[in-house]
Amino acid sequence: MQTLPAPALPSWLESMLPFRRYRVRVGEYAMHVMESGEGFPVLMLHGNPTWGVLYRKVALALAASPLRLLMPDLLGLGLSDRVPAKAHSIDFHAQHVARLADVLGLERLVLVMQDWGGPIGGVAFADRPERVRGMVVLNTVLSPPKPDFRPTSFHRFARLPLVSDVAFRLGGFPMRTLHLVQGDQSSIRGDVARAYRWPLRKLRDRAAPLMLARMVPDSMEHPSIPALRRCEEFVRTFRGPAAIVWGDEDPVLGRVRSWIRQLLPQATVRRTSAGHFLQEEVPDVIAEAVREVAQKCGASLEDLLRRHVPADDKERNDLESMRRFARSLAEPFSRAQEQAHFTGSAVVVDPPGERVCLVHHGKLNRWLQPGGHADAADGGSMHATALREAREETGLRVRLHERAPQPLDVDVHPIPERKAEPAHLHLDVRYLVVAENPDELAHDPAESHGARWLSWDEALSAAAEPALRRLLSKARRYARGLADVERRLAP
């Protein structure tokens, strides 16, 4: 990706934005982007009349997460190129956001949308829905208004001839009044308010706020209506993980939350007392939602697999295959992925590390470690899946082994065709866990034909597959503390 230098910032503003900044050519224009972190891509779209600075607190709250955070400025706003006033439309901005995604190599992403970022993001990916793996929706609209709607006083004012031009272009409206739509008006004061005004400090740069205000429909014949309908269809048909974070004190869109909830029934909802620009007031709540959705999309899974060190050629090949599936599967933890999906399993040992628990798998007629499919409640966490499966299949209280790698092992194995499902692959992520109450072993007949404590030699003898023997050999080293001894003796 070829980048252009980003415009210089005054020192007081630069200190607020400790991110990589650059511009990229998108068609005939250049868009300014701020970027932070590495990992699963998260594209965060703002609206009118803000720019990427709106997401700075959210990005800082996500600094430790395995995420590539991208904060572009819409054309005409922030530090992106200015465009002719008549060019502004949902379709125009959506086309350039889509092109930006291509330039940035975003084949899959979590889409975060606020204000005009909602319709623009929705239309940008309506023709490429497979790229959006998750959504986080902040105060925005994602559909046309009801036929009997009445525009807000702000948007009616934006259409007054001459008066609105004077107010927006000469008076810098609404840049000096952003605090009025906040739950806590002090959240946009001082240098924060200056930061929003700075890119539009010159008269020639102030066309976009007025034109974006006029993009809001004032009738069902408005040019934005078809684009809003496409956005609604995209959101209605989206089946991936989603979250809604809403500022209930928003005087413009506060009451829209219930309608957004109907469009995204699978979304978790976090209501706050913030206003319209809730990124300034509740960045930690938004960051929590982004982490939640990204994890369900496999963001933490990709990072987990990136760090894992294989033990032999079989595990190395399986690991590479699992990394590819983690990137390509739309829902990596869902059984609806017929070709392959991720599973979690656990080697359960007693506190001294002298015994291991295996369960007798009824369908396969083999002694295996506890394990199974991910549940929605696991939140995309493979160790949560492994712990839950261990608890369900043994009745024991279990915890992760504190010294073992996480995961301990990975394995790809085929599952034969059955009546209700075709042949497919299980992409198994395996952990070492400790039973806190080993004497209370009690298998669930619905899960297996039996569960038994075995010595390590007995378990290795019962293991029918090389991958299971490899897993048990690794587990024995860590359960008995041999790995720690080997590290101490290493030159």
Image: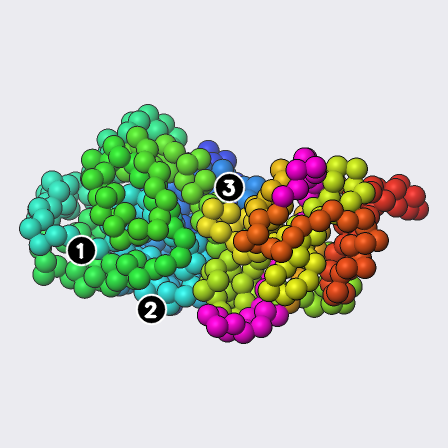
416 above or below 401? below
Q: Is residue 440 magenta-colored? A: yes
Question: x, y percentage for residue 444?
Answer: 57, 49
Between discs 2 and 3, the one toward the N terminus: 3
Q: Which residues are magenta?
A: 414-442
Residue type at mark 3: give it.
Leu
* Residue at disc 2, secondary structure: loop
* Residue at disc 3, secondary structure: loop
Question: x, y percentage for residue 197?
Answer: 32, 39
Question: Distance of mark 1 from mark 2, alpha carbons?
Answer: 19 Å
Residue type at mark 2: give it.
Asp
Residue 286 vs residue 187, the one in the foreground: 286
* Residue at disc 1, secondary structure: loop
Q: Is residue 31 magenta-colored? A: no
Q: Which residue is mark 3?
A: 62
> In percent of the image, x 44 and y 35: which residue is there?
284
Residue 127 - label: 2
Question: Is the C-beta separation of discs 3 and 1 under 8 Å?
Answer: no
> In percent of the image, x 8 and y 46: which residue is there?
150
Question: x, y percentage for residue 291?
Answer: 48, 45
> In percent of the image, x 48 and y 72: which residue is there?
419
Whether residue 425 can be seen here: yes
Question: Distance of mark 2 from mark 3, alpha carbons?
Answer: 29 Å
Left or right of residue 333: residue 286: left
Residue 161 vs residue 126, the one in the foreground: 126
Q: Which residue is mark 1?
A: 144
Residue 16 - label: none
